[in-house]
Structures are given as C-alpha cells and as structure tokens.
Amino acid sequence: MRIKREKNADGAFLVGNAFIEEFLKTLSGSAVKVYLYLKYAENAGADVSLTGISRAAAIPQKDTEDALREIQRAGLIYFDDVGEKALVLTSDGSLRNARERYLDDRYMKRLEAQGKDAGSEYAEVRKSISDEFFNGNMNQNWYNILEKLEREYAFQPETIYLMFKYCSQMVDDIKLGGKYVLKVAESWHAEGILTPEDVEKKLRDSRSDKVYVAAVRKLMGYSRNFTQEERSVILGWKDAGITEGMLGIYLSDTGRVKAYTVKIINDEIGVWKQNGLDSEEAVRNYYAKLRDRRNADAFGEYLDGLATLMGIRRPFTKAEKDAVKRWFDRGVTMDMLKVLLGDTGRVGAFTVAKIDDEVETWNREGLKTAEDVKKHCEAAAAAKKSAGSWNASGSGNASGSGNASGRTPGGRREGRTSDTRRFDNERQYDDDFFRHLEKKNSGGPDSPGSPDSK
C-alpha cells in the first residue's frame, strides 16, 4: 500500500500536539505504535503493508488490523479515492476537528444502539450520583466531568455510577475530586473496563489486592502504609503467583522480619524465579538447604576457634565433635568459652570432657551469655578463696580445735594441733616440783623436820 505524502519532509517526522493532547490517552497501545510507524513511513515515502507494519511494531497481524481500524475511526487516517487509492494521514492542524467529529459520531452511534431511552438513563445516573455523593448539590464542573465520561470514554450509565462508588470507597467522599475520577476513568478505559460486568471483576480484584497487601504488611511487621510504588511492586508479586505462605516462609525462616524492605524481598523473589521456586514446599526446601549449609560452615569455624582456645593442633575425635556440636546447638558462644579458657589458650589445662562438664553446669544454671559465665566464674573463685582462708586461720576458740571432731568445714580430718599454753603450764609445774624436792633433800625450809615444815 502506498502512503500519499501531504508535504515533503527533511528526514525527521513530527507528531502534532493535538495527537498527544487528544488521542494518546484514549488510543490503545497498538494503535499508537501503528500510527507512529505510519508517520515514519509517510516521511520516508515508503510503501507499507500489514506484514511490514506488524514486523516493525512487533505486534500480531490481527492486532495491526484492529489498530488500523481504530485510528481510522478516530479520524487520524483516511483513504483517498482520487486516482490510485492511497492511505492519507490527517494533517496535524486538522487533528482537533477530527477528534471532535470522532467523539460526536461515536457518542451518537452509541445512543442509537442503546435505544431512545439512553439519554434518560444517563440523566437518571447523573441524578443518582448528585443525590448519593453530593447531597443533591453537584456543581457544574461535575456535570462536565460526567459528560466527558459519557462522550469521550463511552462508559455505560451503570458503569459511571459504579466508578463513583469505587472512587468513594478508595478515598473519603469529602476528598473526592474530579482529577481523581478522571484518572480512574483513564485507567479503566486503558484496561478495557467499559461494562458493569467489567467493573464487578475490577472490584473483586481490588478487594483481593487489598487483602494481599494487608497480609504482606503484617508479615513484614510494618506499622506504616506502603507507598504507591511499593504497592505496585507487591501487587506484581501477586500477579506472579507469589503466595502469602511463600513470603511467610522466607521472612520467618531468616529471622529478620522487620529488617526487610520491599526492595530486598523483590530481589529475593528474583532469585526464586531463577531457581524455579513456584510453591511453598519448594521455598521451604530451598531455605532448609541454605540453613544446613550455613550451619555446617558456622560449626566448622566454631571447631577451629575452639582448637585455638585450647591450644591443640590435632583433629578432634568423633566423640569430641559430638560433644562440641551439643554446645554449638545449645547456643554456647565462643565468647562464653573465652571466659573459661582465656583468649590465648591454656594448653593441656582443659580437655573437651572437662569443658563439657562445665557447659552442663552452665546449662543447669541457665547461663546464656559471656557475662553470665564471667559472674559464675568470679563467684566460684571467691568461694574457693574464702574456704582457703578459713582453713589457714584455724579455729577461733581456746582449745585450738576447729570443731570437736577435728574436721575442717570441708569435712576432711586433720591432725590435732598442740596447745602451747597447756604445754607451758605443764613445764612450769615440773620445774616447781623438782625445786621443791631439791630443797627438801638439802634441809631447806620445805624439808621434813625443818621449822617451816611443821
């Protein structure tokens, strides 16, 4: 097919402002692509065909045919029957008039198709909207908006009413604005939502989206609402088949619920797609394997650290590894072991069996941190020192014995200690006796027969 050029071009083609302002928001994506290609071909003076347009626009041939019909009905192109039949693109200066003719023609055809009562149906919808949403005081600006919804977007009367109902649910009635309604109208028109049945499906999907977003927000532990950008990303997860259960497994398994953002989770979901994780079971198995691998690596580092603390270079035996694995699983940290062993190691001072006994004590007493172990060790050292001081000082009574049985507070029997005071008294007694005997034998005052003895 040959395109008839209205004007010569200089190697670049222009798109008129009227196309952007009047047509871009209502034409389908395929129609826009086809129109732009036709503008390019017009400027280059090239012939076009359905196959060539489809290939250039990367759309199926059937969609290309529909797009050509759409832009023809819109008045963007027409066929020149003068001479050789050719396709003509409406000049940019005539686009606005073409738009008005197109809207009027479509509006009138729709009214004719719906019957004579179509006008009264729209009138009833306008009154219902005014009474329900504006307390019967809808201003002229809203009437203009309703006319635009009827003429430009070709929504059915009931669809317009449901649109207002939808908008009022999304925002407070008092905040309901014309710009917001028009934005929703553009979105619905682009999605092909024209009939009441389309709206009902939209509302069901909207409720489902709301439930999904609320569930994700709860799983992430967020107190704030998501931004519009975050919400769009989250709904993309829903469309991709990412269930709440899959997200719950990921967030709970990693144990960092509140540490995650929508971006971090979105990146992780990209990993799921690369690994073909499309079910809760697949996600659960994936993270179980990751967890086992991390635990194995962490336990290996734990063993190496313990060997350094103990000052040994030989490999651990299987029994020793089993004991150390129990400590690791119970949450005995390397810092707790450092309190017991010291940072530089005490070669030969501790065996795994001795440490295992100590760890059992920690477990019984509920010691969970290095600070707990430090206090425990300090208390044990203080008690030992106090017991040693008591033994060294002996008894505090005059008899010289700690207790009547001759046992220490620890229960050990000790040898009797000599009482020096008793020894001194006995020696003094012996000295007096022998002195008295000497005097008696020498006839002294204490001897028999002396005056003192009488």
Image: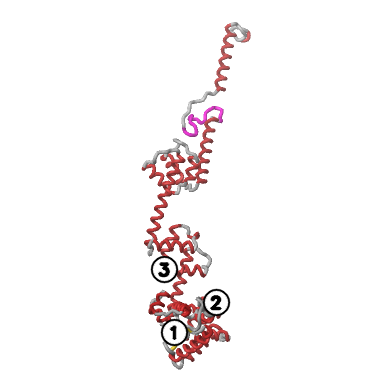
Residue 28 shows in this picture:
no
Q: Quadrant of residue 113?
A: bottom left
Q: Position of residue 79 (x, y in %)?
A: 44, 87
**Nearest to the observer: residue 88 or residue 402:** 88
Residue type of the residue flagged with mark 1 = Leu
Is 248 located above or below residue 46 in the figure? above
Disc 2, disc 3: CB below 8 Å? Answer: no
Q: Amino acid at mark 2?
A: Asp
Secondary structure at numbered mark 1: strand
- Amino acid residing under circle 3: Ala
Say which residue label 2 marks.
172
368 and 434: which one is in front?
A: 368
Q: Give the answer, above or below, for where 302 lies relative to 34.
A: above
Point out residue 86 in the picture as x, y percentages from the top left corner: 43, 85
In the picture of the structure, the residue carrying the numbered disc 1 is 87
Q: Quadrant of the N terminus?
A: bottom left
Residue 241's place in the image compared with 155, above or below, is: above
Among numbered discs 2 and 3, the one appearing first in the sequence: 2
Q: Secondary structure at mark 3?
A: loop
| Residue neighbourhood size for the residue with mark 3, other residues' Cα within 10 Å, grouped as few (<14), some (14–19), many (≥20) | few
Residue 240 badge:
3
Q: Nearer the viewer, residue 37 or 415?
A: 37
State which region is magenta. Answer: 396-411
| 398 part of magenta stretch | yes
Q: Determine the residue positioned at 38% across, 62% down.
A: 277
Q: Earlier in the sequence, mark 1 or mark 3?
A: 1
Q: CA distance from mark 2 to mark 3?
A: 31 Å
Residue toward you, 225 or 54 = 54
- Could you tell me how far apart the alpha carbons at marks 1 and 3 are, in whole angstroms? 42 Å
Q: Secondary structure at mark 2?
A: loop
